[in-house]
């Protein structure tokens, strides 16, 4: 199996791109700060964004603004809702094509549940980028199994999935194996040594996918471990 070619800066680049998309939409200055500062976790990003807010003279968050802009709204980028024009003019809200009008991350960093709110924004950018990578690994392992053992590979290897529904899916489509099952299979027959993926790598991909599937952003170390094995 051929691995993807990843240079040493790939994980850092991907991490920064996710930060820019998560927190920099509508504010080039904040994007520049996030790109310049070394970070490896959501908590470090939160500290930088909070410091950015303090340097901008933002000391507290109006609770009404937080309630009004607690989530994205379906509004035109050029035309925020009439009730939001003052907040828009004073920089409390930003807008993007993908997510509409939202509270500026600097103001969001002052909320009591800032970590959770900022984490959701990081998660949504990471999930759209990293989940396809996890699925690519899953499909490559399935492709190897089909090529080597045929469409009934799960029966030939003698280690079928424990879930009846997953077994039924595999009988219809041999590429429809869950990543967790493939990792378990790897433990039992040392599949990684045959297809080019080692166990630690597959386990890292599984953990990353599980975190993202449960709406939890991942840190830089996880991104690095996954990309290093691609």
Image (cartoon, rainbow, N blue to C red):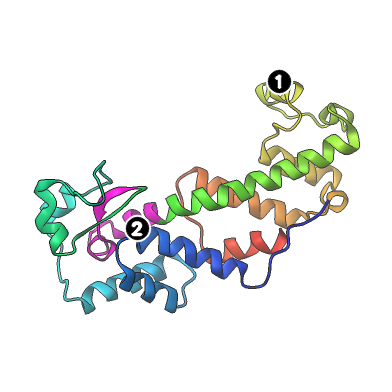
Residue at the image position 33 percent from the left and 48 percent from the top: 99
The kind of secondary structure element at disc 1 is helix
| x then y, percent, for residue 229 | 72, 60
Give residue 184's quadrant in the image: top right
Q: Which residues are magenta?
A: 99-121
Label 2: how many Cα within 10 Å (few below 14, some 14–19, many 20+)? many
Task: Give me the C-alpha separation between circle 1 and circle 2.
Answer: 40 Å
Q: In the figure, 50 relative to 135: above or below?
A: below
Label 1: how many Cα within 10 Å (few below 14, some 14–19, many 20+)? few
The kind of secondary structure element at disc 2 is helix
| x then y, percent, for residue 32 | 38, 75
Residue at the image position 49 percent from the left and 70 percent from the top: 40
> Could you tell whether 23 is left or right of 226 in the image?
left
Q: Nearer the viewer, residue 16 or 158?
A: 16
> Could you tell whether 135 is left or right of 56 in the image?
right
> Could you tell whether 41 is left or right of 197 in the image?
left
Image quadrant where one finds the C terminus: bottom right
Residue at the image position 34 percent from the left and 73 percent from the top: 48
Q: Nearer the viewer, residue 88 or 203?
A: 88
Q: In the figure, 164 relative to 25: above or below?
A: above
Give residue 25's quadrant in the image: bottom left
Q: Is residue 195 magenta?
A: no
Q: Which residue is mark 2?
A: 118
Q: N-terminal of the two: label 1 or label 2?
A: 2
| x then y, percent, for residue 24 | 35, 64
Q: Is residue 107 magenta?
A: yes
Give residue 107's quadrant in the image: bottom left
Numbered badge on residue 168: 1
């Amino acid at each position: 199996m051929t691995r993807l070619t990843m240079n040493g800066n790939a994980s850092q680049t991907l991490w920064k791109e996710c930060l820019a998309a998560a927190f920099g939409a509508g504010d080039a200055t904040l994007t520049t700060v996030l790109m310049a500062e070394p970070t490896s976790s959501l908590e470090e990003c939160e500290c930088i964004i909070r410091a950015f807010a303090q340097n901008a003279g933002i000391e507290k968050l109006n609770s009404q603004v937080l309630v009004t802009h607690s989530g994205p709204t379906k509004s035109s980028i050029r035309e925020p809702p009439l009730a939001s024009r003052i907040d828009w003019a004073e920089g409390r809200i930003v807008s993007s094509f993908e997510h509409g009008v939202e509270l500026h991350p600097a103001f969001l960093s002052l909320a009591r549940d800032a970590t959770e709110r900022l984490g959701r924004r990081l998660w949504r950018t990471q999930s759209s980028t990293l989940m396809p990578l996890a699925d690519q690994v899953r499909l490559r392992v399935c492709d190897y199994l089909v090529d080597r053992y045929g469409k009934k590979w799960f029966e030939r290897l003698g280690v079928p999935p424990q879930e009846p529904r997953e077994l039924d899916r595999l009988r219809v489509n041999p590429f429809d194996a869950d990543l967790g099952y493939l990792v378990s299979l790897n433990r039992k027959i040392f599949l990684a040594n045959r297809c080019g993926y080692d166990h630690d790598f597959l386990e890292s991909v599984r953990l990353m996918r599980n975190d993202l599937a449960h709406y939890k952003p991942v840190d830089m170390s996880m991104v690095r471990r996954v990309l290093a094995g691609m």
